[in-house]
Image (spheres, rainbow, N blue to C red):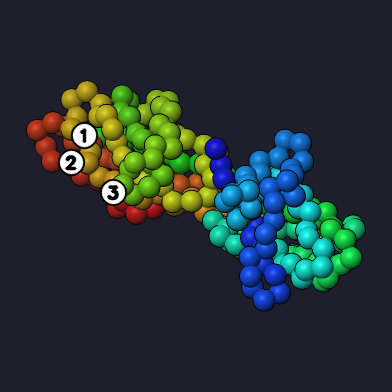
Amino acid sequence: KDMFGFTITMQDWVGAAVALKESAVTASAGSDVIIHSSNGIVTSIDVRAGSTAYIEVPATASVTVSESDAAVADYKLTTTVNGTEASSYTSGFVAQDTLVAFNNDYQPVRGSLYVSKTEAQTGASLTGAEFTLYGDAQMQTVYGKLAEENGSYTIENLPVGTYYLKETAAPAGYELNATVYKVIVASDNANGNPSSSIAVVTVTALGVNNQNTADDPLV
């Protein structure tokens, strides 16, 4: 599941942690909000894309709530207090607790990966290979396997990020290519608006009696 969340932490005006009880945090219907706590006191709150957390901000304290630990640069944190939006919220010694809505309005950018497996001598497309996409360089986290159609291998709807591609099964009569391909899926829109991205990798294969070759693995 995509994370795409921001983390809310709370401090008072001198930077001390605010003792916020778990009961002071609620979420809108269908929202993905995770409360981290210790001994019943909230330490941080994760709010996923499209979700809203409601926090009963304590009265008589200048409490500022702001975004931290965002995984990508274009998250948008909005707060609404009495109909007014702000990037963060300071209670400012109010007379009573104030219910504040924190909305994660991030719109994930998606991309696609296309891989072709070709015969080194003829350039013909090869079927029967298997490619696996990993989410880490150590290849411990499997993101998914690519679907094949007539020698073309694809995986779509990829969140922006860095992935690692490896051939995990070779076509009959060909050696397994040991190259690990670093694949970067990034937004191509300079304005930061959602924009699809396409990454392309070509893997060249030789027969079992020949040494494997591959194009530049950095995409």
Crowd class of label 3 (few under 14; some 14 to 19; many from 20; radius 10 Å): few
Can you give x and y, in whole percent of width and height, for residue 68 in the image? 60, 62
Query: Which residue lies under the disc numbered 1?
Result: 176
Alpha carbons under labels 1 and 2: distance apart: 8 Å
The amino acid marked with disc number 3 is Asp
Q: Which of the marked residues, 1 or 3, is nearer the chain's N terminus?
A: 1
Is the C-beta separation of discs 1 and 3 under 8 Å? no
Residue at far front of view: 39
Query: Which residue lies under the disc numbered 3?
Result: 215
Is the C-beta separation of discs 1 and 2 under 8 Å? yes
Q: Secondary structure at mark 3?
A: loop
Q: Nearer the viewer, residue 106 or 129?
A: 106
Q: Secondary structure at mark 2?
A: loop
Alpha carbons under labels 1 and 3: distance apart: 15 Å
The amino acid marked with disc number 1 is Leu
Q: Which of the marked residues, 1 or 2, is nearer the chain's N terminus?
A: 1
Can you give x and y, in whole percent of width and height, for residue 25 in the image? 73, 48
